[in-house]
Amino acid sequence: MGRMHSKGKGISRKSLPYRRSPPSWCKIDAEQVKTEIMKYAKKGYKPSQIGVILRDSFGIPQVQQVTGSKILRILRVAGAAPALPEDLYHLVKKAVTIRKHLEKNRKDKDSKFRLILIESRIHRLARYYKIKKQLPPNWKYESSTASTLLA
């Protein structure tokens, strides 16, 4: 599938192993993984950052293979899931930084154009998450209050 706002047609994707059971060399148990996930969530890490930490520090290839459920689902059950979905959060963060840049550099036409593209992606993603009931139906992105969403 092509990109939304560029001309790339890349097919880059992850390739997970066929087996769904944890590898024989992974000796950590599910409860220990869940406690580590909750520890890092309380520190303020996002689910993807938690996965990277578990992979690099503890040698856990896939959390879903060890625990039977994904990181975000574990956080949702515990009530520690982030309010905004992660991809939407990063788009809003990018839009806020570009808007801050435009306050200083008013003549930067390219950044103004890119901001329009990013905000259209935010609206499209928000529409998807409202349909999937991950955002409340009255949630609306407004550039004036966007920085409060990040705090």
Image: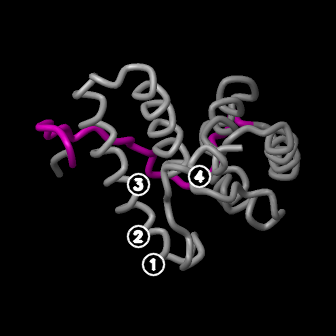
- Viewer-nearest of discs 4 and 1: 4
CA gap between label 3 and label 1 equals 14 Å
Q: Which residue is mark 2?
A: 127
Q: Label 1 amino acid? A: Ile
Say which amino acid is labelled 3.
Answer: Ile
Alpha carbon separation for disc pair 4 and 1: 23 Å
Where does the image place residue 14, in percent across and percent down from the top left? 38, 41
Magenta-span inclusion, residue 25: yes
Marks 3 and 4: which is nearer the front? 4
Q: Could you give the CA–CA distance between mark 2 and mark 4, rounded to whole angstroms? A: 18 Å
Q: Residue at x 45, y 28 (%)?
A: 103
Task: Identify the residue at image location x=88%, y=47%.
Answer: 35
User: Which region shows up in magenta?
Assistant: 4-26
Label 2 vs label 4, nearer the camera: 4
Q: Which residue is mark 1?
A: 131
| Cα distance in 3D space between marks 3 and 4 | 14 Å
The one of 138 and 34 positioned closer to us in this rendering:
138
Observer-nearest of 97 and 136: 97
According to the picture, the residue beneath numbered tag 4 turns out to be 145
Query: What residue appears at the point 23 percent right and 28 percent down from the top-left corner?
Result: 109
Q: Could you tell me if the residues under marks 3 and 1 are in contact, i.e. CB atoms within 8 Å?
A: no
Q: Report, in whole angstroms, how far the alpha carbon at label 1 lies from the one at label 2.
A: 6 Å
Q: Nearer the viewer, residue 137 or 98?
A: 98
9 sits to left or right of 60: left
Q: Alpha-carbon neighbours of circle 2 within 10 Å: few (<14), some, or many (≥20)?
A: some
Q: Which mark is residue 122?
A: 3
Proximity of marks 1 and 2: CB atoms separated by less than 8 Å: yes
Is 40 left or right of 1, judged from the image as shown? Answer: right
